[in-house]
């Protein structure tokens, strides 16, 4: 168990809809990262937060947004969903400094029909 | 942009044999490297890491080698077991921009 919790585990929705994915980082970790993984593909970095502030942006679509709350949990909002948004979405947390690995949750599998 | 790539997308190894998974990286400024294992339906799991000031690091049945001259990273798994079957990703971090970049992954299959 990595200590990173993601909910829900599975999400099925229709095109055009909006969903919110949730992530609770490991206790004490200040940074949260979001990644997208399509079928049999690598992990594409979406966005990073550190202690409530946006730290870095990757290949995140304008239809997607995220935030990190004062209690350090994070939400990824996906709107105007398209079929191509179907993927696994992973959250990872990091203590925020030093040479230490990111720890990943088990992801949310999003299926857009 | 900078990228981390893998030489082979798939690798099959007989149970009990040793396996080596390779990774090439292009950012010579990367400070820290990590190997992750991802089993089906799960998130990437940390295996082992190495800082750029090191050449080799050993864990339990795993060894990571870093060759900065040719920008090459490898993961050696000794005495492979069926549970080692998974996709393995290398990743690099540049502390300057705190960006973690993943390779595309190698699927390791252990043949009983």
Image (cartoon, rainbow, N blue to C red):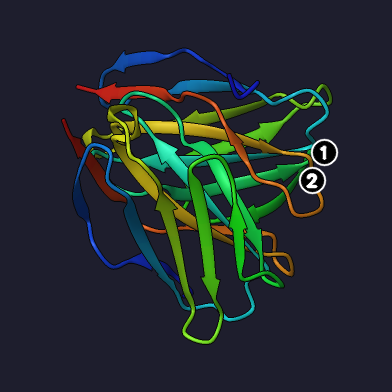
Q: Are marks 2 and 1 on the same chain?
A: yes
Residue beneath disc 1: A51
Residue appearing at x 40%, y 59% in the figure: B103
Tell which of A104 and A108 is nearer to you.
A104
From this viewpoint, is residue A61 visible? no
Chain under label 2?
A
Q: Give the class, few, some or many, for how many residues have Cα within 10 Å of label 2's Cα (few <14, many ≥20).
A: some
Picture mark count:
2
Tell which of A57 and B28 is nearer to you.
B28
Q: Quadrant of the C terminus of chain B?
A: top left
**x%, y% of residue A97?**
82, 50
**Label 2 secondary element:** loop
**x%, y% of residue A46?**
51, 47
> Residue A74 bears which disc, if any?
none
Chain under label 1?
A
Tell which of B59 and A41 is nearer to you.
B59
Q: Is residue A39 left or right of residue A79?
A: left
Q: Is residue B112 left or right of residue B24?
A: left
| Vertical arrangement, residue B30 with respect to residue B80, above or below | below
Point out the tag, 2 or 1, that comes first from the N-terminus. 1
From this viewpoint, is residue A57 visible? yes
Q: Give the class, few, some or many, for how many residues have Cα within 10 Å of label 1's Cα (few <14, many ≥20).
A: some
Residue beneath disc 2: A96
Q: Residue furthest bottom?
A: B69
| Vertical arrangement, residue B13 with respect to residue A92, above or below | below
**For the residues bearing labels 2 and 1, Cβ distance under 8 angstroms:** yes
**x%, y% of residue B54?**
68, 69
**x%, y% of residue B58?**
59, 52
Tell which of B86 and B101 is nearer to you.
B86
Residue appearing at x 34%, y 57% in the figure: B20
Marks 2/1: CA–CA distance? 9 Å
């Amino acid at each position: 168990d990595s200590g990173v919790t993601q909910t829900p585990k599975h999400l099925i929705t229709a095109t055009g809809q909006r969903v919110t994915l949730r992530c609770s980082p490991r206790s004490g970790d200040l940074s949260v990262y979001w990644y997208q993984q399509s079928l049999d593909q690598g992990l594409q970095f979406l966005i990073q937060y550190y202690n409530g502030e946006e730290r870095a942006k990757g290949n995140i679509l304008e239809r997607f947004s995220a935030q990190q709350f004062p209690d350090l949990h994070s939400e990824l909002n996906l709107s105007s969903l398209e079929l191509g948004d179907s993927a696994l979405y992973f959250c990872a947390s990091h203590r925020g400094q030093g040479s230490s690995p990111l720890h990943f949750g088990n992801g949310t599998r999003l299926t857009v029909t | 942009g900078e990228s981390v790539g893998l030489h082979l997308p798939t690798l099959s190894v007989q149970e009990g044999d040793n396996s080596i998974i390779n990774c090439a990286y292009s950012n010579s400024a990367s400070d820290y490297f990590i190997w992750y294992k991802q089993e089906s339906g799960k998130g990437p799991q940390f295996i082992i890491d190495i800082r750029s000031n090191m050449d080799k690091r050993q864990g339990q049945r795993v060894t990571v080698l870093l060759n900065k001259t040719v920008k090459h990273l490898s993961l050696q798994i000794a005495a492979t077991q069926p549970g080692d079957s998974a996709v393995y990703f290398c990743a690099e971090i540049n502390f300057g921009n705190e960006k973690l970049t993943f390779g595309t992954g190698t699927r390791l299959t252990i043949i009983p």
